[in-house]
Image (cartoon, rainbow, N blue to C red):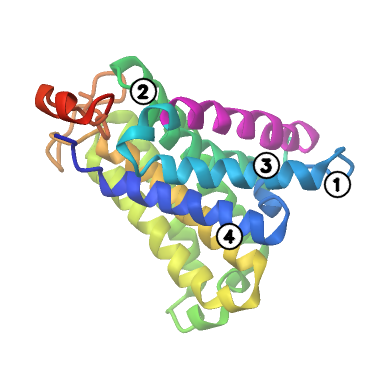
């Protein structure tokens, strides 16, 4: 019998499908989240190829027969994206908080792919470490951006909040707090779940009203949900741990496989031939 997929995997898949579709529609990469120089030979063809790959990955995560190979290929794809497209930005501008934030965002998506790929304890624990490294990057980027832009960091419809700047600071601080919770084992499952929820809420409140404006907002909306899904996948690796558990630092916290591969009973194998 096939196990029901976790909602985190479904969100991850949906965001990948949406990213692939936007790539096909626009014939281009995901703007600042995929830093491919304009002078790269065959850039447009490569953009279409990547869009098809992302669409295939998203669909592959939904079907039991394609899940295993999708997991095996998605993780190295994200590693290549992170290493080739994001790290050079930090090398060029090591003091730019935005460049570090970009690495943090794609690293979190990579973490989600890693957790889906890793069936063993060592791989999932390593993915958790990468999330712990990435969360302060996005948190600090938000704080620095808020210092530079003040209340203008918030869109007009969020200016009605009391002290919009404080809310922006709070979101950045929350990512850093989630990092510390995971690192030192203070409510780790709750910390990761709340971080994922916060990122999803920000995507809706900040980017959804801009969707009518076109490509930039649409891409940002999709990437934001892909980041949220990455954190949510990690939160699922803490299933079985009490929400308010303490004393479970990252190097000791128990691990639950975030979304086990579907299994097939002997009877199903006999009746379905070569079914997975």
Could you give the CA–CA distance between mark 1 and mark 3, rounded to whole angstroms?
16 Å
Mark 3 residue crowding within 10 angstroms, few (<14) / some (14–19) / many (20+): some
Q: Which residue lies under the disc numbered 1?
A: 38
Look at the image and tell me in which quarter the N terminus lies. Answer: top left
Q: Which mark is residue 49?
A: 3
Secondary structure type for disc 3: helix
List x then y, in percent, for residue 254. Answer: 20, 23
Q: Which residue lies under the disc numbered 2?
A: 118
Q: Main secondary structure of the magenta part?
A: helix
Q: Is residue 226 left or right of residue 188?
A: right
Could you give the CA–CA distance between mark 1 and mark 2, rounded to whole angstroms?
35 Å
Tag in front: 4 or 1: 1
Tag in front: 2 or 3: 3
Could you give the CA–CA distance between mark 4 and mark 3, rounded to whole angstroms?
20 Å
Which numbered disc flags the more N-terminal residue, 4 or 2?
Answer: 2
Label 4–label 2 contact, CB within 8 A: no
Give the residue drawn at x 25%, y 28%: 257
Secondary structure type for disc 1: loop
Region in magenta? 71-93
Secondary structure type for disc 4: helix
Q: Is residue 175 left or right of residue 39?
A: left
Could you give the CA–CA distance between mark 4 and mark 1, rounded to whole angstroms?
20 Å
Look at the image and tell me in which quarter the C terminus lies. Answer: top left
Which numbered disc flags the more N-terminal residue, 4 or 3?
Answer: 3
Which numbered disc flags the more N-terminal residue, 4 or 1?
Answer: 1
Give the residue drawn at x 74%, y 32%: 88
Q: Is residue 81 magenta?
A: yes
List x then y, in percent, for residue 181. Answer: 31, 38
Secondary structure type for disc 2: loop
Could you give the CA–CA distance between mark 2 and mark 3, rounded to whole angstroms?
26 Å
């Amino acid at each position: 019998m096939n196990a029901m997929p976790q909602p985190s995997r479904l969100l991850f898949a949906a965001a990948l499908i949406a990213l692939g579709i936007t790539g096909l529609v626009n014939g281009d990469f995901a703007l600042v989240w995929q830093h491919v120089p304009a002078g790269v030979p065959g850039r447009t063809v490569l953009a279409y190829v990547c869009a098809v790959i992302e669409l295939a990955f998203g669909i592959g995560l939904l079907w039991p027969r394609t899940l295993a190979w999708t997991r095996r290929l998605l993780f190295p794809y994200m590693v290549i994206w992170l290493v080739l497209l994001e790290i050079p930005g930090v090398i060029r501008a090591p003091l730019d908080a935005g460049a570090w934030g970009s690495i943090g965002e794609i690293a979190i998506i990579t973490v989600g792919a890693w957790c889906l790929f890793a069936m063993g304890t060592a791989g999932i624990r390593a993915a958790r470490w990468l999330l712990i490294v990435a969360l302060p990057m996005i948190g600090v980027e938000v704080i620095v951006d808020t210092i530079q832009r003040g209340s203008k960091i918030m869109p007009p419809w969020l200016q009605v909040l009391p002290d919009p700047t404080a809310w922006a600071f709070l979101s950045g601080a929350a990512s850093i707090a989630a990092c510390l919770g995971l690192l030192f084992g203070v409510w780790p499952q709750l910390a990761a779940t709340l971080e994922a929820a916060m990122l999803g809420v920000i995507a809706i409140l900040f980017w959804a009203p801009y969707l009518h404006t076109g490509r930039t907002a649409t891409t940002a909306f999709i990437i934001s949900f892909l980041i949220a899904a990455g954190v949510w996948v990690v939160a699922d690796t803490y299933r079985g741990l009490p929400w308010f558990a303490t004393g479970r630092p990252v190097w000791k916290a128990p691990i639950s496989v975030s979304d086990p591969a579907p299994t097939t009973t002997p009877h199903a194998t006999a009746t379905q031939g070569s079914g997975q």
